[in-house]
């Protein structure tokens, strides 16, 4: 039986993917790529067994999911691929239309938390596809994540201000920000503990493999992208892929604030699969 495993189709997961290919793990799993919003749906629906998901989705489905230890997509300061892109300085966004990419869940709530708690602002939010020109036709500012956010930073126009939400979060809380976690359906973990262990070890092994040779990974990724290898290596270095105590503390602080916005239930503890 091959476990059905999700994969985020953004460059942030390229190091993981590179390791899976090089370590011949792809043959052992059925890998399905999607945006975070798609994976967020497919895992609880049972179309996937194990997947990276937006960290806020763990809070929303905590009774049905367990976390995989040791893996996340986090940052300690600038993340470089989660931006508020704005036509005016942030202070001018109160009551203004603000377009949120429909590929995100965690960053949508993160932006609301930052604008409320750090800037005391309440824009009029709406969700739409991540097409920056379309977004800015209808809104004063837009939230982008993943590759469209990287592109916006790479081709930054003079007229737009970019706010990095990883940096904003660190400035406000002094903490790391966890954007994505890997989760398994509890039912699957109960029925197939060995498979969960195998997948978890493979993912961790692949990640370690890539982090040990990040220059090569960046050069390989640059072959298919508009960015050069140095830009990508710098990007990969801003991301953290582990899930240690500091990331967990940052995540619990995020959940606490998200709960006060009523966008997720309270989370008192993080429950991990035994691997
Ligand atoms: C750092 C990132 O984190 C992402 C942000 C997510 C979200 O906002 O829900 C989900 C998964 C991650 O891919 C990114 O996309 O660039």
Image: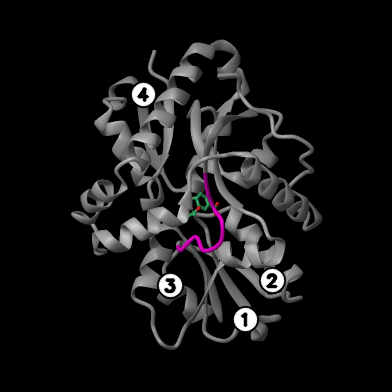
- Please state which of residues 165 and 240 is positioned toward the viewer in this rendering: 240
Instruction: Judge the density around disc 2: few (<14), some (14-19), many (≥20) Cα neighbours within 10 Å.
Output: some
Q: Secondary structure at mark 3?
A: helix
**Residue topped by disc 1:** 90
Compared across the picture, whether 76 is left or right of 129 comes to: right
Q: Secondary structure at mark 1?
A: helix
Chief secondary structure of the magenta portion: loop
Q: Quadrant of residue 133?
A: bottom left
Which of the labelled discs sits on residue 132, or is there none? Answer: 3
Residue at the extreme left of the image, as rendered: 223
Compared across the picture, whether 138 is left or right of 5 comes to: right
Residue found 71% across the figure and 61% down from its top: 173
| Place of residue 233 in the rendered image (x, y in percent of width and height, measured from the top left) | 33, 56
Q: Quadrant of the N terminus?
A: top left
Which of the labelled discs sits on residue 29, or is there none? Answer: 4
Instruction: Judge the density around disc 3: few (<14), some (14-19), many (≥20) Cα neighbours within 10 Å.
Output: some
- Marks 4 and 3, how far apart at CA: 35 Å
Labels 3 and 2 touching (C-beta < 8 A): no
Bounds of the magenta span? 73-80
- Marks 1 and 4, how far apart at CA: 44 Å
- Marks 3 and 2, how far apart at CA: 20 Å
């Amino acid at each position: 039986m091959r476990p059905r495993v999700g994969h985020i189709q953004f460059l942030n997961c390229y190091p993981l993917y590179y390791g899976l290919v090089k370590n011949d793990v792809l043959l052992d799993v059925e890998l399905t790529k999607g945006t975070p919003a798609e994976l967020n749906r497919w895992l609880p629906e049972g179309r996937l067994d194990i997947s990276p998901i937006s960290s806020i989705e763990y809070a929303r489905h905590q009774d049905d999911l367990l976390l995989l230890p040791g893996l996340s997509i986090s940052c300690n300061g600038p993340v470089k691929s989660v931006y508020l892109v704005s036509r005016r300085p942030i202070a001018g966004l109160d009551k203004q239309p603000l377009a949120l990419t429909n590929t995100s869940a965690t960053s949508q709530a993160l932006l609301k938390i930052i604008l409320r708690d750090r800037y005391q602002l309440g824009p009029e939010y709406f969700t739409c596809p991540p097409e920056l020109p379309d977004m800015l036709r209808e809104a004063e500012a837009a939230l982008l994540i993943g590759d469209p956010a990287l592109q916006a930073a790479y081709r930054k126009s003079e007229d737009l201000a970019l706010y990095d939400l990883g940096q904003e979060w660190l400035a406000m809380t002094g903490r790391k920000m966890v954007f994505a976690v890997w989760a398994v359906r509890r039912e699957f973990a109960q029925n197939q503990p060995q498979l969960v262990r195998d997948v978890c070890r493979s993912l961790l092994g692949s990640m370690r493999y890539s982090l040990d040779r990040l220059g090569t990974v960046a050069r390989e990724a640059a072959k298919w992208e508009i960015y050069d290898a140095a830009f990508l290596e710098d990007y990969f270095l801003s991301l953290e892929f582990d899930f240690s105590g500091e990331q967990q503390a940052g995540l619990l602080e995020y959940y606490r604030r998200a709960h006060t916005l009523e966008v997720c239930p309270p989370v008192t503890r993080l429950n991990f699969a035994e691997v």
